[in-house]
Image (cartoon, helix red, strand yellow):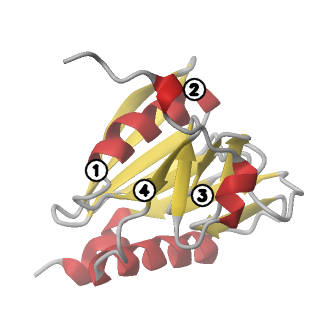
Amino acid sequence: MPALKREFFPHYNYEDYFSWEGDWELIDGVPFAMAPSPVKNHQMIVGYIFSHLVDKFTCEDCDILIDSDWKLSSSTILKPDVALVCDDKNEKYIAKTPELIFEVISPSTAKKDETLKFSLYEQEGVRYYVLVYPEELIAKVYKNRDGKFQKVGDYDTQTLSFEDLKCALDFDFGTIFKRFRK
């Protein structure tokens, strides 16, 4: 069977994306429907991460955002679960590369978060990428060094100091996962 040629598929852009109903991501002109509403634990963990960051963060130059559009180009718009963005004055969407991104993994998004978004975040120079696994109650943390993500470690009860962000912060993974431990 011959491979499908890209020229046979529509190529969408930000204007198309902006007019769609529902939640979408657009990667290189290809639309990806966001999974149906995430399960309760997924949303709770996203909320706890956001709340923990807000409680620990005092930097006025940076914003902590949930589920906001990050426009990489006219044909690529991503929606990180939680992002720390500094010195970005754009009010419509994230226009600057986030320093820190958390993606809470669900079965329907795992492959995209672990491969496609991993690669895009790496290329765009995201300083830290944190993949959070609600079923295992573990977070895999990656740091961008010379354009490549290198694993910092797996975290479940530890605190990690993000000292080299524009505004340093300590993040206690144990606090986030505590409620979900049985």
* Residue linked to disc 2: 123
Tag in front: 1 or 3: 1
In the displayed structure, 3 sits above or below 138; it is above
Amino acid bearing label 1: Ala
For badge 4, the amino acid type reads Glu
* Viewport quadrant of the N terminus: top left
Q: Position of residue 103 (x, y in %)?
A: 42, 56
- Asked if labels 3 and 1 touch by Cβ distance under 8 angstroms, the answer is no
- Badge 3 crowding class, 10 Å Cα cut-off, few under 14, some 14 to 19, many 20 or more, is many
**Circle nearer the N terminus (1, 4):** 4
Mark closer to the chain start, 3 or 2:
3
Q: Look at mark 1 in the image and give the residue it sits on.
A: 110
Q: Which mark is residue 83?
A: 3
Classify residue 65 by image quadrant: bottom right
Q: Which mark is residue 103?
A: 4
**Dot 4 crowding, Cα within 10 Å, few <14, some 14–19, many 20+:** many
Q: Residue at x 53, y 54 (%)?
A: 25
User: Which residue is at a point 33% across and 57% down the rendered structure image?
Assistant: 132
* CA gap, disc 1 and disc 2: 19 Å
Name the amino acid type tagged 2: Gln
What distance separates the C-alpha of mark 1 from that of mark 4?
9 Å
Q: Which is nearer the N-term, disc 1 or disc 2?
A: 1
